[in-house]
Image (cartoon, rainbow, N blue to C red):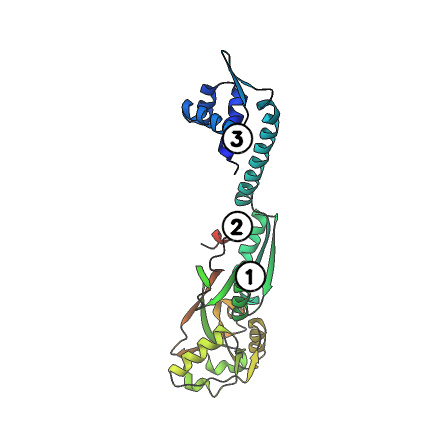
Amino acid sequence: MVNLELYKVFHSVAKCGSLTRAAQELYISQPAVSQAIKQLESQLGVTLFNRTHKGMELSSAGGKLIAKKVEDALRLIEDAENSITELKTTAAGCIRIGATDSIFSHLIADKLAEYNERFPAVKLELISSTSLETVSQLKEGRLDVAFMNMPMEDAEVKLITMVSLLNDIFIAGKKFSKLQGKKISLIELQDLPLLMIEQNTVHRRELSEFAHKHGVDLSPDIEVANWDFMVKLAVKGMGVGCVPREYCQKQLLSGELFEVQTNPSLPARSVGLFLAKNVPAQYALKQFIELFK
């Protein structure tokens, strides 16, 4: 088996022409250098150096034959190590990011732009789906990082940091202005035309569980696939929607929508940044994660 350290000592002695100077260069003792040379000579079955009063000279039948090849080999190894170091300290390659359309547009768009400005060599591949679909993609290795609605209880993924709070509220447009300024019960909501996100989502599951705890079954008159469409329907007077306040701030400020106050109010949720467990993160991904901590 090749002992790389012995060849490093050989190369240093050949370059320095002295056991003492080689020991100083390698930060080891002179006897250790001498022993390493003897061990390598024993393994190869040749004399590598001629010991003279001037120091150590490469032997014609041994040292001179391998000196250049050893130097080239050590340089190749150094280049390989430098490549690994560069990989660990240079942002390059591609990061596959999973999230819902709303999380991309309302919560992390600014951070994506900031990262792109800092690390333009890194390609950001944005893959949109529901949080429940996203967790499957993360576990299967089709994503490097995911932003998902919480709680997300899955032993195969790990929460790195919370990104944002989401405050679910009921909203309505001018058609339902009689509700503005009033506080209604969850039971009263049952009598209103409700707009709700589709069933295979964390939000819908959490909303249903919350309502059931209060003895109420909230069923939608219209079920939609994304928040932006729900907000548009609410503005048009199609019904009372349930949406995170963070996703309809513009319409609330403009007066197109108002918050329908309920008793009790809905609990806050959060969005987290997740990685697959036991999968190492390269430098580019580590830098991306740091933006959200």
Q: Is residue 35 above or below residue 245?
A: above
Which residue is pictured at 47% across the width and 77% down the height? 205
Quote the CA–CA distance across marks 3 and 2. 32 Å
Q: Nearer the viewer, mark 3 or mark 2?
A: 3
Q: Which element type, helix, strand or loop, lies under badge 3? A: helix
Q: In which image quadrant can residue 250 be found?
A: bottom right
Quote the CA–CA distance across marks 1 and 2. 14 Å
Mark 1 burial class by Cα count in 10 Å: few <14, some 14-19, many 20+: few
Q: Which residue is more in the foreground, 208 or 49?
A: 49
Q: Amino acid at mark 1?
A: Gly
Q: Amino acid at mark 2?
A: Gln
Q: Which residue is mark 1?
A: 141
Q: In which image quadrant can residue 58 be found?
A: top right
**Residue 185 is at least partly visible in this image:** no
Query: x and y percent of residue 133 in the render?
Result: 55, 70
**Residue 72 is at least partly visible in this image:** yes
Q: Which residue is mark 3?
A: 7
Which residue is pictured at 45% across the width and 72% down the height? 168
Which residue is pictured at 55% across the width and 63% down the height? 98
Which residue is pictured at 44% across the width and 75% down the height? 206
